[in-house]
Image: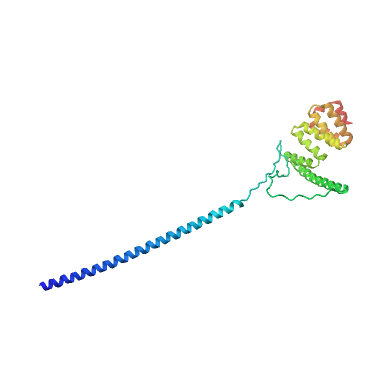
Amino acid sequence: MSHINEALRKAQKDRDAHSLEYTGFLSSRKEEKRIFWRRALLWSSVLLILILLAFTSYSWWDSRGQKTLEPVDKKTLATRPQAGRAATVKPSLPKSRARAKTSQPRTVRRAKDSPQEAAASARGSQQNAARGAKAFYEKARRFHKRGRLQDAKRFYQEALRLEPSYVDALNNLGVIYIGDKEYMAAQRNFEKAARLKPGYVDAHYNLACLHAIKGEATQSLVHLRKAVALDRSARDWARKDTDLENLRGLPEFEAIIGG
């Protein structure tokens, strides 16, 4: 029995020794793994720091280089039409720009144009202005016929800006001024048209209407008589025109339209 017990104790000691060896082996393996991961973490941290330093340095140099290359935002403001009762249609003109940093090349001018060249240039400018004025006038007439009087007014004004002596535009704009009760402006237009073209019947007839509306019978009769002398058709206009209502019943008026 003691022999058996002795054998059992010996077997137990062998098992315990084997267990200790196995445990020690496992512990050493775990320690090696910890060391490996610590080293991996250390190198990863170092690499990350280097990457961040490189990125920061690049960003700093890049931003420093761009400071001298910032574009200057230049804006051009355009003038708008001035508004009275109705804005005048004017081509947009740029306001004076701020002086640029870089110098602009100067235009080289010839010493002097010959008189013939100067005259030809002036004629060309006048012809261009006349064509532009006619285009504005035709557009104004279309609006006038459609009853779009403020649009017509703007384009008549544009025609006169290009050609101030455009008598038809002066006359038609004066008619619109009468409708707007701008009597002084209307009178200036009609009188200017009559001065520029003394035989212009419409200007004298419209002056007769304007003075009649204002209750100025004497001046109205003077211009009506002049209009009929220039064109007998003015009598027919006067018979139906309500603008001449203040003259009806006057012997002079009846003599003019009935003669």
- Horizontally, residue 147 falls left or right of residue 36, namely right
The quarter of the picture where the N terminus appears is bottom left
Spot occupied by residue 174 in the image (x, y as percentages of width and height): 79, 35
Q: How many marks?
A: 0
- Horizontally, residue 110 falls left or right of residue 92, namely right
Residue 194 occupies quadrant: top right
Spot occupied by residue 60 in the image (x, y as percentages of width and height): 53, 53
Residue found at x 37% / y 62% = 37
Residue at the far left: name it: 1
* Looking at the image, residue 246 lies above or below residue 15: above
Spot occupied by residue 62 in the image (x, y as percentages of width and height): 56, 55
Residue found at x 79% / y 38% = 172
Residue 125 visible in image: yes
The quarter of the picture where the C terminus appears is top right
Residue 237 visible in image: no
Spot occupied by residue 12 in the image (x, y as percentages of width and height): 18, 69
- Horizontally, residue 27 falls left or right of residue 11, namely right
Q: Nearer the viewer, residue 93 or 149?
A: 93
Q: Nearer the viewer, residue 182 or 252?
A: 182
Residue found at x 25% / y 69% = 21
* Looking at the image, residue 51 lies above or below residue 91: below
Residue found at x 89% / y 34% = 229
Residue 167 occupies quadrant: top right
Residue 221 occupies quadrant: top right
Q: Nearer the viewer, residue 191 or 175?
A: 191
Q: Nearer the viewer, residue 67 or 187?
A: 67
